[in-house]
Amino acid sequence: MLTPRRLLAGVAVLFCTVILADWLLPPPIERAGEISALVTDREGKPLRAFPTRDGRWRFHGDLAKIDPEFIEALVRVEDKNFYSHRGTDWGGLVRAALDSAKAGRVVSGGSTITMQTARMLEPRDRNIRSKLIEIARAWQIERRLSKDEILELYLTLTPYGGNLEGVRAASWSYFGHEADRLSDDEIALLIALPQSPEVRRPDRHSEQAERARNWVATKLNWYGVFSEEDVADVAASSVPGRRRDFPMRAWHGTEKALASGPYMDVRSTLDASLQAELEAIALRSAEEEGDDVQVSALVVHIPTRAVRGLVGSASRDRAGGWLDLTAQARSPGSTLKPFIYAMAFDDGQATPDTRIADLPKRFATYQPQNFDRMFRGDVRVSDALQHSLNVPAVLMLDRVGPERFAAQLALAGARPRIHGGASHQAGLALALGGAGLTARELAVLYAALGDGGVAKPLVWRAEEEAASYERMGHRLISAQSSGEIIRILQNAPMPEGRMPGRLTASAPQVAFKTGTSYGFRDSWAAAVSGEHAIVVWVGRADGAPRPGKTGREVALPILFEIADRTAHHLQDEGEARTRLTTSRRLNTKGALRTFTPETPPEILFPPMNAELWAGEVNGKPTRGFVLAGRGEGALSWYVDGQACDVDDAGSPVWTPQRPGFYSVTAVDDAGRSSTVKVRVLTGPA
């Protein structure tokens, strides 16, 4: 006999059974976990989309990125009671059943948005059993998710034909833009397609797609969402006849931005306009250099360490193009020399005006030579750095200590890869590129040079930029030494055809250093240009040599072009503040002597009272000394009254025939002259 107590007990058992079943058999919401990702630039412009592992395009249905008018229209057509029911609209389900019975066929399924979401999570044959399971799953989903979360899940999984899932993927593929701003005809089409996604695909069945779209527009008019004029405009619009390609720009930079945090839609630190310029410059430069040549480059905003542009390779169609060559360790050539001198400045070992010997020198079994195989005697440290002399740099590294230097670089985030010895300890060859570094690590170092000597890691995501200002970095060199190094590099000899930035109103001040690895395998140029660090690498991806191709000849022109484009595109980042020409210029008072100085020429090499080595080196005679100076017009050179020889390049060359004292004289076009006394050594004094 059914008593109230038994009835209550039965209800309790049923309730506990339902709760237990809900706990033991939860809805498989995690099946929608793998989604595509879209990486944009710092202003939200799309750069690259990433498909799921199975090749589908399925973007998260973020309501903030979907037109609210589309959401309103969708709910009105698919589930007008969505915000009031608990998973199943029983009235709508009964009406759908009666309508289908009268018509003798299924007119509508009566499924709510939540039930459709359950069906997309667990696809089944369409029958009464499946419908009952959908009802149960819908109730479970409603218990776990809010209405907005259910809508986002629905808009993520909705099929749109082929490998398209979700409204955002469909909008990108059919319309070529995000779903945040949709026209009336686009709204109607996006609502119509999921009902029969393969039959109504506009790229394959345009007539069916158009009829379905127009029918949805008519229904939206009945519901008061569209006006009569809206329906007429929709009918007059064509449907897209093809699928568009998803954005595929900034191939390597977007990949790094995506990998640097959670897998999701990412706003990167890249600048789309600058990125496009970098890609064009890299491709053109690589094509000019030869079939197997690649170019990589990156631009870093120094205050935040945000990567504004990155080209891992000039083209994926060229050899090695799929590699991100900014992340491949290569010999940096002479690009580390500024940091050697800076550490020596910090130690009090030298200043920019310190004299240092550029003469043959052996360090145990290691004997460095200058690139042109000439020696210049005593030179200032600033001149040695500007002209990238090798022997002074090795002398300075010997004082600083190669192991200490390598350790400091590693602490700054640029660990040298040292090869060739059982201990893999740093040696003096590190001064000339005897270790591997990546372009990204060089960018870390040069950004530190431009930030008072403090090294910080690079930033790839826009939301991390603000925190970078406050992040503690590693003190690589002092602010005073970094400033002195920048001033030295800003006054280095400019490439041919390039006017110094301090003499122009639009060009940025560029403190640059070039590098060429042993065997001409890598050509480098690195710089601090305004508030940006720039690194350029040119070479072959397989490391094959390119005889005669130096960093100054090949990489430096690319760097200056990038510096100009960076100053143009990123003016909002303080580039103008670093140009000397922004200060007010004083008007000349009219004295003609301003343009015809009376000062005599200045002899740069050899300096006064220098001692020059002219003896043998390794049993071979040394080459002649190249004389250098500056003055009005071309200079004529004399040694003890005898005119100097001139080499094939037109440079004055002096080859002493005996040891002793000499007088070296430079004469300008106006007859003004300067003389220095030097001593030539060929053996022990």
Image (spheres, rainbow, N blue to C red):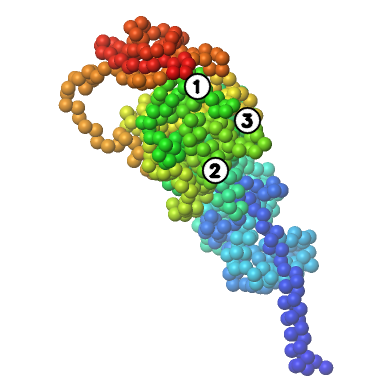
Horizontal side, residue 564 vs residue 549: left or right: left
The answer to whether the residue labelled 3 contacts the one labelled 1, judged by CB atoms less than 8 Å apart, is no
Which amino acid, mark 2? Ala
Horizontal side, residue 198 vs residue 568: left or right: right
Q: Residue at x 77, y 60 (%)?
A: 124
Report if residue 440 is visible in the image: no
Closer to the chain start, of discs 2 and 3, is 2
Residue matched to label 2: 407
Residue matched to label 1: 360
Which amino acid, mark 3? Ala
Please identify, in this view, whether the residue under mark 2 or under mark 3 is nearer the observer.
2
Please identify, in this view, whether the residue under mark 2 or under mark 1 is nearer the observer.
1
Q: CA distance from mark 2 to mark 3?
A: 28 Å
**Residue 253's spot in the image, x, y percent?**
56, 42
Residue matched to label 3: 541
Q: CA distance from mark 3 to mark 1?
A: 35 Å
Which image quarter holds the N terminus?
bottom right
User: Is residue 449 placed above or below 642 in the rendered structure?
Assistant: below
User: Is residue 493 placed above or below 245 in the rendered structure?
Assistant: above
